[in-house]
Amino acid sequence: MKQVKIGVLGARRGQDMIRFCMNTETAVLTAICDNSPKLQEMEAKYPNQGIRFFSDFDSFLQEADMDAVVLANYANDHAPFAIRCLNAGKHVMSEVLPVETMAEAVALIEAVEKSGKVYAYGENYCYMPAPREMKKLLKEGRLGKFEYGEGEYMHNCEPDWASLTLADPMHWRNRMYSTYYCTHSIGPLLFITGERPVRVSGFEVPFNDRMYRMGAQAGPIGTEIITLESGALLKSIHGVGPSENSIWYSIYGSEGRVESAREDAENGAVDLVYLNLTKNKVKNLTSYEPAYQGEEAGKTSNHNGADHLVMEHFVKKILGDPEAEIIDVYRAMDMFLPGLFAYRSILHGNMPYEIPDLRDPAVRERYRNDTSCTNPEKAGENLLPVSPGGDPQIPDSVYAAHRQKLIDNKVL
Ligand SMILES: NC(=O)c1ccc[n+]([C@@H]2O[C@H](COP(=O)([O-])OP(=O)(O)OC[C@H]3O[C@@H](n4cnc5c(N)ncnc54)[C@H](O)[C@@H]3O)[C@@H](O)[C@H]2O)c1
C-alpha cells in the first residue's frame, strides 16, 4: 500500500497526529518541527525510526521528505504556514482555527485553489460519535427537515491554563476574544446539517474572576445565534472560563430530535445519543452508542476516537479514496466566520452581521485587506480590543505567579 509521508509542525497537540502515524499502515511520520524543548522530548521518545527533527520551519519545509504537513502550531498562526506549505506542493491538515483575519481567509482560499492540493480542516469534534450519527440520521430522513440545532463546547481551562500559555500574556490563548475558538460548537452542527451559515449575532458573558486569575483577557463564554441558508437556526456556546465542562449537541428536525448525553449524567456524553421520534403521543425514545467507523487502532485515540478519524480521512483523501470525508477550506470558513463576525456583532450592540461566502471571487474583494483582529502583530490600524469594554488590566503579578508555578513543577 502507498503510504503518505507526513511531517508535523508543533509537538504539543501535534502528538495526537504523531500517534496516528504510529498506529496506521496508511501513513508514515518523516519529520517533526518544534522550536521549544518539546523537540528534544520527541527526539528521546522516537529514536532510530527514520524521523528527522527540526527546530526551524524553513529547514523543515525545504529538507524533510513529506507529502503532507500537519499544522499543530499556534491557533492564530495557521494560515501563513498553510499557505507556505501549499505553495511548496504539500497537502495540509490544519488544526483549529483556520485563519485569524478576513485577509488571511481570502489568501488561504486562493492558495488552496492555486495549489490543487488537499487542505483539510482538523475540526475533530465533527468526527466524534454523536455528531457522525446525527449526520447519518438526518441524511436518512429519520428526523424530517432540519429546523434547529444547539452545540456546546464549554471548557473550564483554569487548572491547565499556566502550562497551556506558559505564563505569556501575549500567548494566543490569552489574547483571543470570546467567540474566536468557535468551531468545536459550530462545526459539528454544520457538519450534521450540511448547510451554509448566512447571518450571525454574537453575545458574550462579561469578564469574570476566573479569566482574571488565568490571565486571559476575553469574556469567559461566547455565543453565536446563526441563521442558515434554509432559515433554520443554530445556537452555539463555548468558552474557556465557565465553571463546568460540557460538550453537547442537539438537533431538532420536523419529525423528531436527537441529542447527545449531558456530561453531568455521567453516562457516555458524546459517545451516546438519545433519539426521540415520539409521534401523536406514542413514545419512541431510544438511546444507543453508535459504532466506531474507522481503523480499530483509532478507537482509543483522544477526543472519543475522533483524533485518529480526522487523520484517517485526510490520508484517505490524499490517496484518492472517494469515501474520504474531509472538511475543505470553504467548509472551514463556514465554521469559523460566524465566530469572527459574532465578535464584530458584540462590539456593535449585538447587531446581526451577514456571513460572506468567500467561494465567490467577487465577494473576496471586500475583505482582501481586512486585517481586523485582536493580534497587534497582524491588525495594524485595525486592532480590536479583546473585551468590548477594552482590554482588561491584568497585572504582571498574575503571570509571575503562573511562571513560578511552572518553575516549581519543572515545566519551565
Ligand atoms: N482540536 C483539538 O481538540 C485541539 C486540542 C488542543 C489544541 N488544539 C490546537 O492545536 C494547536 C496547538 O495548540 P497546543 O495546545 O499544542 O499549544 P500551543 O499553541 O501553545 O503550542 C504550539 C507548539 O508549536 C510550536 N511552534 C509554534 N510556532 C512554531 C514555529 N514557527 N516553528 C516551530 N515550532 C513552532 C510551539 O513551540 C509549541 O510547542 C492550536 O491550534 C490549538 O487550537 C486543538
Image (tube, rainbow, N blue to C red):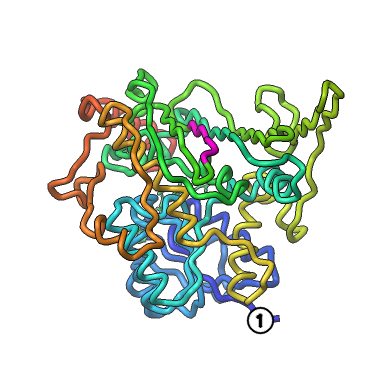
Residue 40 drawn in magenta: no
The answer to whether residue 39 is visible is: no
Amino acid residing under circle 1: Lys
Out of 293 and 243, give the one closest to the viewer. 293
| Relative image position of residue 215 (x, y in whole percent) | 32, 29
At x 50%, y 43%, the residue is 228
129 vs 222: above or below: below
Asked whether 159 or 176 is in front, the reply is 176
Extreme residue in the top direction: 209
Query: Is residue 234 located in the magenta-colored stretch of the structure?
Result: yes
Residue 18: percent from the left, percent from the top?
A: 57, 61
SS of the residue under disc 1: loop
Q: Residues within 10 Å of mark 1 (few under 14, many from 20)?
A: few
Question: Magenta span: helix, strand or loop, mainly?
Answer: strand
Instruction: Classify the position of the N terminus by image quarter.
Output: bottom right
- The structure residue drawn at horizontal position 61% and vertical position 53%, both measured from the top left corner, is 307
Q: Is residue 177 above or below residue 302?
A: above
In this view, the residue in front, 338 or 292, is: 338
Q: Position of residue 348 (x, y in %)?
A: 25, 30
On the image, the x and y values in percent for residue 377 come to: 20, 51
Q: Is residue 269 above or below residue 205?
A: below
Image position of 133 (left or right of 91):
right
Task: Say whether residue 304 is visible.
Answer: yes
- The answer to which image quadrant residue 151 occupies is top right
Write the start and end of the magenta stretch as one range: 231-237
According to the picture, the residue beneath numbered tag 1 turns out to be: 2
Which part of the image, by quadrant, shows the C terminus?
top left
Left or right: residue 321 compared with residue 388: right
Quadrant of the rendered image containing residue 164: top left
Q: Residue at x 62, y 76 (%)?
A: 319
Q: Compare residues 207 and 9 and report the one nearer the observer.
A: 207
